Amino acid sequence: MRVVTPGELNESEAEAWRALRVTSGAPANPFMEPEFTRAVGRVRPGARIAVVREAGDPRGEPIGFFPYETGPLGRGRAIGLGVSDAQGAVLRSGLRLSAPELLSACALSAWEFDNLEAGQGLFVPDAAEEFESPVIDIGEGYEAYETILRARSPKFFRTTTAKERKLGRQAGEVRFVFDERDPAALRTLMEWKSAQYRRTGRRDRFAQDWISALVRQLATTRTPGCSGVLSVLYVAGRPVAAHFGLRSRTVLSCWFPAYDPEFAKYSPGLILHLRMAEAAAATGIRMLDLGRGTAEYKDALKTGALRVYEGSSARPGARAALYWLSREPSRRAHSFVRSRPRLARYAQRTLNRVGRLRDK
């Protein structure tokens, strides 16, 4: 194995990475492409890639890639942990390699993940929890998806489309742009999202410089496997809802949606997602991945779900034990709350109160 920074990954190696992803059979999630890891490498100094080759053939074609970030005491984490919605290694099928061997080659005592994709046989056995990542299947076209919505959730579909018509009547012409290139629109979205985080008592991701820089960088990235897409719903020329995500040829990973609270009664976020699904289908995208987590809008829009995992892999030793002691109690506490809806609702109300106090 050869450990490099993302900037040291050459183009022939990147092509081998892309080819391995194609043969993996996994959805073409842009977070698993070399472009995402390269982008993280520009804003996270600890970003690394283990390039795996056949023993005895150090100049041969790579047979695996493992992107990760380094931390203190040999603690590792998934590349872009906290914002990346698909994580794992990119390995040739049938490759004989164990998680401890891989971690040892990277000088890691442990490797943490929170959105490990299904099929990662090396790491799934170490997962502590399994989650759904809701998806919208538009493989048969938007009309087929709309037919499913009309049959499964007729009231939801009628209400949302009626609100869109009402929005046009009361506020002005409704216009949708699937791939907006105006930097001002991206800044507006980030401001809305920051306000939403504060309003709901959550940590503002865009207050972290590396996340803001990563999003701005990916907004200008244009490659077949990983491109930034900013979608905006305008009313009378004014943005009222927006979303920034990453797309490949066939998958749109939904990442940062937000809307102007002044227009909340019209449900502009739902209108935006329906327009996104329609436009995405027209460009050849077959699936919208709404991301891990429960939310009413995801339940209303989804047609199915993928599986993702949270946990950590560790090598036996004192450092791994220290890592377990520092992380596992907190993880178990969060899991305890999530698994009890009544307690989770109480926790959410508490966060909302904290958010209101913070804004005063």
Image (cartoon, rainbow, N blue to C red):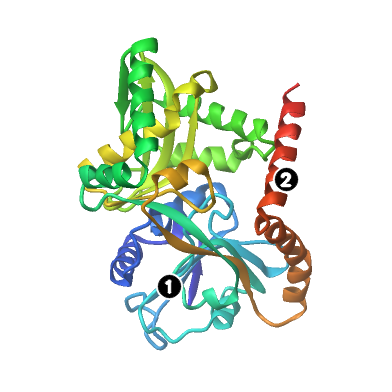
Rendering coords of residue 253 (x, y %): 40, 49
**Residue in the foreground of this view, choosing between 124 and 303:** 303
- Res. 281 image quadrant: top left
Rendering coords of residue 334 (x, y %): 70, 57
- Res. 100 image quadrant: bottom right
| Left or right, 60 with reference to 42 | left
Picture quarter with the C terminus: top right
Q: Would you say the residues marked 2 and 1 are in contact, meaning their CB atoms lie under 8 Å apart?
A: no
Total marks shown come to 2
Residue 119 — which label? Answer: 1
Mark 2 is on which residue type? Ala
Residue found 51% across the figure and 53% down from its top = 292
Mark 1 is on which residue type? Gly
**Residue 123 seen in this snapshot:** no
Front label number (2 vs 1) = 2
**Residue 51 seen in this snapshot:** yes
Residue found 73% across the figure and 44% down from its top = 346
Kind of element beneath mark 1: loop
Residue 347 — which label? Answer: 2
Residue 65 — which label? Answer: none
Between discs 2 and 1, the one toward the N terminus = 1
